[in-house]
Image (cartoon, grey):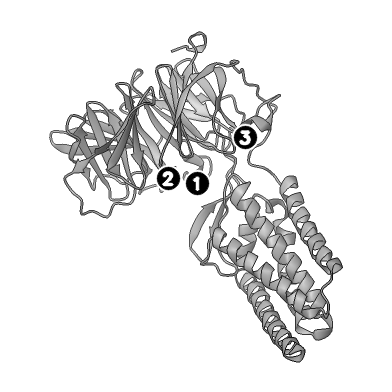
Amino acid sequence: MGFQFTSLKKILLEVLVLLFILLFVYASISKLLEFNDFQTQLGQSPLLGAFAIPISYAVIGIELVTSLLLAFEKTRKWGLYLFFLLMVMFTTYIIIILNYTSFTPCSCGGVLESLGWTEHLIFNIVCILLAIGAIYFIHVKFSKQKLMGLLSLSALGIILVIGLFLSSEQEIKRNNAFQRKYSPHGLEEIGNFPLESNSFYIAGIANNLIYLGNYFAPLYLKTIDFQLKTSKEIKIKIDNYQLPYKRVRIQVIPPYFFVGDGTVPILFKGKTSNWKAETFSKDDAYFYQFTLLDSTSLAISTTSTNTNTNVLGILKSVNDSIKLNLNTQALKQQHNGTFDTDGLLLYNQELQKIIYVYYYRNQFVIANKQLENISQGKTIDTIKQAQIDVAYYLKKDEYNLGKSVLVNRTASVFGKHLFINSDRLGKYENEEVLKSASIIDQYHITDNTYIQSFYFYHQPLKKLREFKVYKDLIIGLVDNQLWIYQIKPEYNYN
């Protein structure tokens, strides 16, 4: 019986070793064949970007050395321990990427490239367990000392990767060149409302109601009153259900609402009295964002077919036809006019001004309803030039955005003021506060002046996805919860 068990252990060991050799040989050859993509991917990593060149060579070399050690019986034991260490390090890297970095880089190329990050994590954990089994099989007696050795090796791998993470350039950077003026306890919590999922977005606010759209239920609205006591569902009807919809968004400004999908492209217009919408515009312009200006016109952000850069435009209904006016000069490009001009399109009803807040620089654009009289505003941040990390992956023929510095995350306008959410830390600020709060900066639009900043507190370890300001209320979505704060009268400059 003991002989049979020993033979079975030997067979299982041979099978596992062969699998490990195939895995690492395939991995190293794949990286060599697509070396440019592999090196580019490392360069965009929030952990390894600063060390991309040496690590790209080291990983391939260590994988090949490990395969050679595994191939020979005399060195197999060392090969198994090295394989185990590498898999622990790869797994730790994925866990940090998924949970502790501000963006997830492309997983293009390499081993099992069809798998996403989560699937890679599961695959790696299985490999670690198999490696432990192989190490158990190779020893005549598996003692507590050997178990402690594996635990120590695991700790070493985890510490090495965490060390790289802590020493690498972080997305949230301290910038002692600006200093915020915080209004102490300037916001008073009204309450929070739990939602069914984190797929909601704010479609509109009016008449004591918050209208929430849902990315996964595109023709349904949920309404919640300001007191967070009642909610109800609204089903929107449109006159064409047959189109290939991909990105439906709703905007509600009573007595009208619009439904749009810029990938079709199509826009529907309806009244909130019956929630029925008819086609307003079809095939007139593809767009990324739209915002309602009045009952007959909308502002859009799109890409110019002439320049292949981001531009702003106006879609207006004139005598039962749609007129499109694009302004190719409104957005100032700094690199290629695509990622560097990305931003958020807003409209200020009181001032009748279109506002476009750049994501990657300390600037915003102000224009009238005709996209004329364009001026630039500035935030208190000091990044004037967009710091964009864009990489091209040859095999997939696509561009991916990496560890770029995000200056303005999201924004809202009301009255004469612009409110911007930013994770960038100024002088004397503590990064710990961002674990349970978001920073909102307030600006005067016409005077182009900074007024004050607030801490918008919410559930820990989550980020403010979107917020809207309505009168003296700040309404925000954080994961699957809706939060409402009131600006205290002494800090309300509207």
Q: Based on the displayed image, in which of its 4 quarters is residue 219 positioned?
A: top left
**Mark number, residue 435:** 3
Quick one: which residue is furthest to the right in this view?
Answer: 145
Q: Position of residue 274 (x, y in %)?
A: 17, 33
Tell me the residue at 67%/74% (across/down): 24
Circle 2 — which element?
Answer: loop
Q: Gap between marks 2 and 1, in whole Å? A: 7 Å
Residue 447 vs 48, above or below: the answer is: above
Q: How crowded is the residue under tag 2: few (<14 C-alpha within 10 Å), some, or many (20+)?
A: some
Amino acid residing under circle 2: Thr
Disc 2, disc 3: CB below 8 Å? no
Q: Earlier in the sequence, mark 3 or mark 1?
A: 1
Spot occupied by residue 330 in the image (x, y as percentages of width and height): 41, 33
Asked whether residue 424 appears in the rendered view, the answer is no
Locate the C terminus and report the quarter of the image it occupies: top left
Looking at this view, name the residue that lies furthest to the top. Answer: 490
| Sequence-first disc among 2 and 3 | 2
Circles 2, 1 touching at the beta carbon (< 8 Å): yes
Q: In this figure, which residue is indicated by the disc labeled 1?
A: 336
Q: What amino acid is at disc 1? A: Asn
- The image quadrant of residue 138 is bottom right
Q: CA distance from mark 2 to mark 3?
A: 36 Å
